[in-house]
Image (cartoon, rainbow, N blue to C red):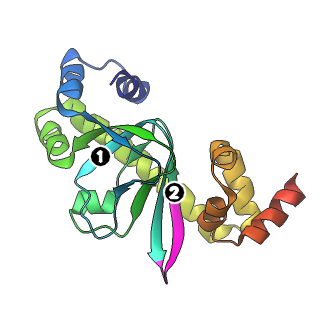
Amino acid sequence: MKELHHFIARYVPDLSPAFEEDLYRVFYTKKLKKGEHLIQAGQISRTLYFVKKGMLRNYLIKNDKELTVWFFFPENFVTVFDSMILQIPGKENTIAMTPCELYAIAYEKLEMLNKVSHEWEHISRVFTIEFALQQEMRLYMFQTMNAEEKYQFLLDMSPHIIENIPSKYIASYLGISRETLSRIRGRIA
């Protein structure tokens, strides 16, 4: 749990000893094999995960085609956010791209902590705002940029995606064909 504790402490310094006790009490470890689903469309997301090791991909199925939504790396929180918060069936799938180790907390336990602890409530608010800002940045990218600008933006903002993710998933995420991605990479190189 030290990875999760250190990660949260970067955003919220001076965490109390009670916070650390809660962290070890309510989070548990989950392991996934490469190709194993963490979350499947149609299910209600009842858990928030934190990636300790590995990479995951979030995707939708539309017209029998996988559309990549996002990627998760170490030090990322993972859930289908609207499904977890609203407790409705989610539309997204999350699959392990490599063997993964995650820390997990049931949404009901997180909500209980938020109700009894201002510290946990503050931490939840900080990461909810962080998530909203990331979504806003992605929305801006998709609504205002052409294919080459989207790739350059991704390269500038998230080079670890370009370095670690197969091109077919990057192309899917950007909403372009692999051929277009290849041409863009050729021009930028």
Total numbered badges shown on the rendered structure: 2
Q: Hey, what amino acid is under mark 1?
A: Leu
Disc 2 residue crowd, few under 14, some 14–19, many 20+, Cα 10 Å: some
159 horizontally vs 59: left or right: right
How far from the left and from the top, in percent, is residue 72?
A: 49, 47
In the foreground, 130 or 4: 4
What residue appears at the point 47 percent right and 64 percent down from the top-left corner?
59
Q: Nearer the viewer, residue 148 or 69?
A: 69
Magenta span: predominant SS is strand
Instruction: State whether residue 186 is above or below residue 158.
Output: below
Q: Does the stretch in magenta take in 143?
A: no
- In the picture of the structure, the residue carrying the numbered disc 2 is 70
Which of the two discs, 2 and 1, labels the residue nearer the N terminus? 1
In the picture, measured across the screen, residue 89 lies left or right of residue 143, that is: left
Determine the residue positioned at 42% across, 28% down.
Answer: 7
Residue 159: give x, y in percent of width and height. Answer: 68, 44
| Residue closer to the observer: 44 or 146 | 44
At 78% from the left edge and 70% from the top edge, which residue is drawn?
Answer: 179
> Which residue is tagged 1?
48
| Label 1: how many Cα within 10 Å (few below 14, some 14–19, many 20+) | some
- On the image, the x and y values in percent for residue 47 come to 25, 49
Q: Residue at x 14, y 47 (%)?
A: 108
Question: In the shown orientation, is residue 46 left or right of residue 14?
Answer: left
Please, is residue 79 above or below residue 102 in the view?
below
Q: Specify the quadrant that holds the N terminus.
A: top left
Whether residue 35 sits left or right of residue 157 in the image: it is left
Viewer-side residue, 113 vs 34: 34
Q: Mark 1: which secondary structure?
A: strand
Q: Marks 2/1: CA distance?
A: 16 Å
- The residues colored magenta run 62-69
The part of the image, by quadrant, that contains residue 95 is bottom left
